[in-house]
Image (tube, rainbow, N blue to C red):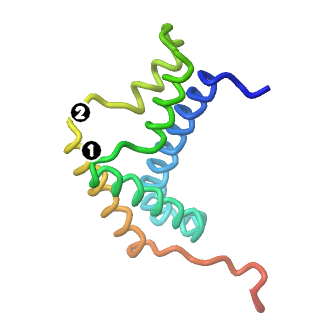
Amino acid sequence: MPPPLSALARLVLYLHLGVIVFNLFWLVAIPLGAWRGWSFVRSFGWRALHLASLAVVALQAALGRLCFLTIWQEELTAAAGDTGKPSLIDELVTKAVFWPLPAWVFVVLYLAVLVYAALLWFLVPPRRSRIGRAGG
């Protein structure tokens, strides 16, 4: 039996928060890690995923579209007929994810963050893993 739609909506909300935390983590970890000599901040795969994630977010905002995770959550919540009061944790997560600001603020913010992450790509370049290569 599939989980109730309200539980899926909650799962999407928490996934959304996870994506935000992932993106914020790397924005701080990359310059800090470069300064501290942490090799994991040069992981090509994680860095590529980070940059791609930010590019998707910025592109959606620039096109005037909601994030697909927001759309999924809203559709699941509506389909579940959720009208009850959310739990305190759900309410806190919702406030952390959704800010009551005009759309243009998000466009500027997301594009600025994307430019910053792209600069980090060149200032702290990622390295491909040497595992499985001859001599490495």
**How far from the left and from the top, in percent, is residue 126?**
52, 73
How many residues crowd around disc 2 within 10 Å: few (fewer than 14), some, or many (20 or more)? few
Vertical placement of residue 119 versus 11, above or below: below
- Which image quadrant for residue 114? bottom left
Q: Are marks 1 and 2 in contact (CB under 8 Å)?
A: yes
Horizontal relation, residue 4 to residue 120: left or right:
right
Asked if residue 113 is positioned above or below residue 105 in the image, the reply reads below
Q: Which mark is residue 132?
A: none
Query: In the image, is 94 to the left or to the right of 119?
Result: right
Mark toward the start of the polypeptide (1 vs 2): 2
Label 1 SS: helix
In the depicted structure, whether residue 31 falls above or below residue 133? above
Would you name the residue on which mark 1 appears?
Answer: 106
The one of 30 and 89 positioned closer to us in this rendering? 89
> In the rendered image, which quarter contains the C terminus?
bottom right
Residue lying at the far front of the rendered structure:
79
For the point 49% across and 22% down, the residue is 78
Disc 1: CA contacts within 10 A as few (<14), some (14-19) or many (>=20): some
107 on left or right of 71: left
- Which residue appears at 47% of the width and 62% of the height? 52
* Residue under the image location 56 percent in, 20 percent down: 80
In the picture, residue 118 is in which quadrant? bottom left
The kind of residue on which mark 1 rests is Phe
Report the quarter where the N terminus lies. Answer: top right
From the top left corner, tell me how far across and down residue 107 is, in percent.
Answer: 25, 49
From the image, tell me which residue sits under label 2.
101
